[in-house]
């Protein structure tokens, strides 16, 4: 006897991912800060911050469509990205 969730003839969608791992290099970009405090609009200095760029059709295959909201969980040495 089939359970309540069984639907005969309906196949579950299969996502074909090219690879289960991707490797990127952490680069940097510049951010500005103002030494005179919040709300001040004087000459700002620049400093480097870590930056990671992710792009590719593999993101869409994994469920990250254009304009999708992404939740990032932060742990020591680990980032977990999930769609909202």
Image (cartoon, grey):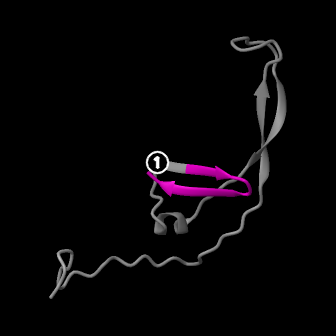
- State left or right for residue 7 relative to residue 70: left
Label 1 crowd bin: few (<14), some (14–19), many (20+), radius 10 Å: few
Q: Which residue is painted at 71% across and 14% down in the image? A: 38
Q: Nearer the viewer, residue 36 or 5?
A: 5
Quadrant containing the N terminus in the rendered view: bottom left
Q: Eyeballing the image, is 75 above or below 21?
A: above
- State left or right for residue 77 relative to residue 60: right
Return the x and y of residue 10 as percentages of the image width and height: 21, 81
- Whether the magenta-drawn stretch holds residue 77 is answered as yes
- Whether the magenta-drawn stretch holds residue 58 is answered as no
- State left or right for residue 30 relative to residue 13: right
Q: Secondary structure at mark 1?
A: loop
Q: Quadrant of residue 49?
A: top right
Q: Which residue is painted at 67% across and 54% down in the image? A: 53
- Residue that protrudes farthest toward the bottom in the picture: 1
Return the x and y of residue 67 as percentages of the image width and height: 45, 49
Q: Eyeballing the image, is 35 above or below 16?
A: above
Q: Main secondary structure of the magenta part?
A: strand
Q: Which residue is painted at 51% across and 57% down in the image? A: 82
- Residue that protrudes farthest toward the left in the picture: 1
Count every numbered label the image shows and give the total: 1
Return the x and y of residue 45 as percentages of the image width and height: 84, 25
Return the x and y of residue 30 as percentages of the image width and height: 78, 37
Q: For mark 1, what is the residue?
A: 69
Q: Which residues are magenta?
A: 72-84
Q: Which residue is painted at 73% across and 11% down in the image? A: 40
């Amino acid at each position: 006897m089939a359970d309540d969730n069984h639907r005969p003839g309906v196949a579950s969608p299969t996502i074909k991912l090219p690879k289960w791992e991707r490797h990127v290099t952490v680069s940097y970009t510049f951010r500005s800060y103002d030494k005179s405090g919040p709300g001040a609009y004087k000459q700002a200095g620049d400093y480097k911050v870590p930056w990671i760029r992710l792009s590719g059709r593999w993101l869409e295959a994994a469920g990250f469509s254009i304009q999708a909201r992404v939740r990032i969980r932060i742990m020591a040495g680990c980032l977990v990205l999930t769609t909202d």
